[in-house]
Image (tube, rainbow, N blue to C red):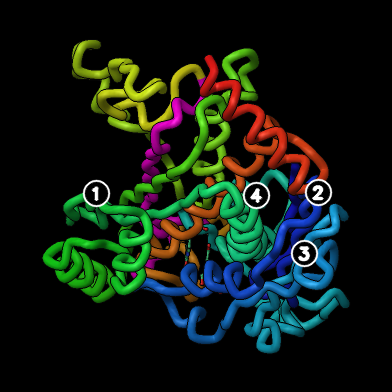
Amino acid sequence: MRYLTAGETHGPQLTAIIEGFPSNVTIDADAVNFQLARRQKGHGRGRRMQIEKDTARFVGGVRHGKTTGAPIALVVDNNDWKNWTKIMGIEPVEEEEAKRRVNRPRPGHADLNGGLKYNQRDLRNILERSSARETTVRVAIGGVARELLKQFGITVAGQVLRIGDVEAQRADLPLDELIRITEESPVRVVDKDAEARMIAAIDAAKEDGDTLGGVVEVIVEGVPVGLGSHVQWDRKLDGRIAQAVLSIQAFKGVEFGIGFEAARLRGSKVHDEILYEDGSFSRATNRAGGFEGGMTTGAPIVVRGVMKPISTLYKPLQSVDIDTKEAFTAQVERSDTCAVPAASVIMENVIAWEVANAFLDKFGGDSLEEIRRNYEGYLQQVRDY
Ligand SMILES: Cc1cc2nc3c(=O)[nH]c(=O)nc-3n(C[C@H](O)[C@H](O)[C@H](O)COP(=O)(O)O)c2cc1C
Ligand SMILES: C=C(O[C@@H]1CC(C(=O)O)=C[C@@H](OP(=O)(O)O)[C@H]1O)C(=O)O
């Protein structure tokens, strides 16, 4: 499977096309929209989230609630577009005022690199596309992927582990409970004490015109052994997941299982011993986070991602005016203070897509029925091994 997205943050809509999705999968539009609603929540978001009410509009590939095997096309409208029609319209505009030109690049955003690379003197042409607004459709795509995963009992959930210097106690709960509890938290944690301190830290950063990043953990349960492959670099599923996580705007690091901690431990404290009980293989621990050789071990996938602090600062950093080349502070665009809770939902959904894609690579078929036959045959092979 593959997908492409298009659209600008203040343009009319974000658009996605998914190619290669199998037929006969029930698409619960409410479940997809639930993912979009989750992405809009979280303490620390700016005013934009009050303007938008994101919903996915399916415009191809789904009929009477089921996929047909044709490309799935979906659209998320930007409510804010009505305030930007002149500035973001296709037609040329003359007045400088109507352009809302950006000429003082924000350190940490895509503005300067993008301007130089695409030879754009209005950095709005860069920020409009680099904006994390694009993640609306990626979350909708993840929501579609989850509809396939659901058929095979695969569940994805996330929690925030850190915001700035406040660390939350990691909750080790059944995933449905984790989803239910984090859903009620404005910072997507289970640890109530940390929740209060995280909210206070976000408020303090906002007060100072500053921003905060953090750490997010995502868990995938119900994956069979053997998704991904050791035989070719780009078929390693941990590698694909890492790329997907790092493709989320502002994500700068990724780790699996005990992750970077492995660097300071001996091998005996890192690897997961192999057991054979009740007719099947298992592991004493899951320090590897569900991967060996780029393939799933059958244990839950455990991935953490690091999000840097938002780069638009209301007390802006030093920058340079691209016209005069004079020192100036960076431009201030309406912005979030902290988007780590929202990013946890994005991370869940981009990972859901990668797992669904690897699932199809392994059990590939054009219809759900064909995939199910292949899947069940493989499970029998594993049982008989
Ligand atoms: C959910 C979410 C919301 C974001 N909101 C903002 C924002 O309001 N202002 C901002 O400057 N950056 C925001 N970002 C981060 C920028 O999009 C990102 O830093 C920029 O595209 C440059 O890419 P890079 O940080 O990956 O290098 C957000 C990121 C995410 C995931
Ligand atoms: C629109 C979203 O996030 C935006 C991501 C973003 C950025 O620079 O990445 C900048 C802000 O855009 P605006 O200036 O329109 O408020 C965020 O609100 C969203 O998540 O749906």
- Between the C-alphas of marks 3 and 4, the distance is 40 Å
User: What is the C-alpha distance between the residues marked 1 and 3?
Assistant: 35 Å
Q: Do the residues labelled 3 and 4 touch (CB within 8 Å)?
A: no
Region rendered in magenta: 294-320
Residue 314: image location, x then y, percent: 37, 71
Labels 3 and 4: the sequence-earlier one:
3
Q: Earlier in the sequence, mark 1 or mark 3?
A: 3
Q: Which of marks 1 and 3 is in front?
A: 3
For marks 2 and 1, give the one nearer the viewer: 1
Q: Which of marks 2 and 4 is in front?
A: 2
In the image, taking residue 179 as reference, residue 72 lies left or right, namely right
Find disc 4 in the rendering and name its residue.
Answer: 114
Crowd tier of the residue under label 3, counting other residues whose Cα lies within 10 Å: few below 14, some 14–19, many 20 or above: some
Q: Can you tell which mark lies on residue 19?
A: 2
N-term mark: 2 or 1: 2
Q: Nearer the viewer, mark 1 or mark 4?
A: 1
- For label 1, the SS is loop
Where residue 173 sits: x, y (%)? 26, 53
Give the residue type at disc 1. Answer: Asp
In the rendered image, which residue does mark 3 sit on? 66
Q: What element carries label 2?
A: strand
- As helix, strand or loop, the secondary structure at mark 3 comes to strand
**Amino acid type, mark 4:** Gly
Mark 2, ligand 2, within 8 Å: the answer is no
Q: Quadrant of the N terminus?
A: top right
Q: Distance between the residues labelled 2 and 4?
A: 28 Å
Q: Do the residues labelled 2 and 1 touch (CB within 8 Å)?
A: no
Q: Is residue 117 above or below residue 147?
A: above
Residue at left 44%, top 20%? 292
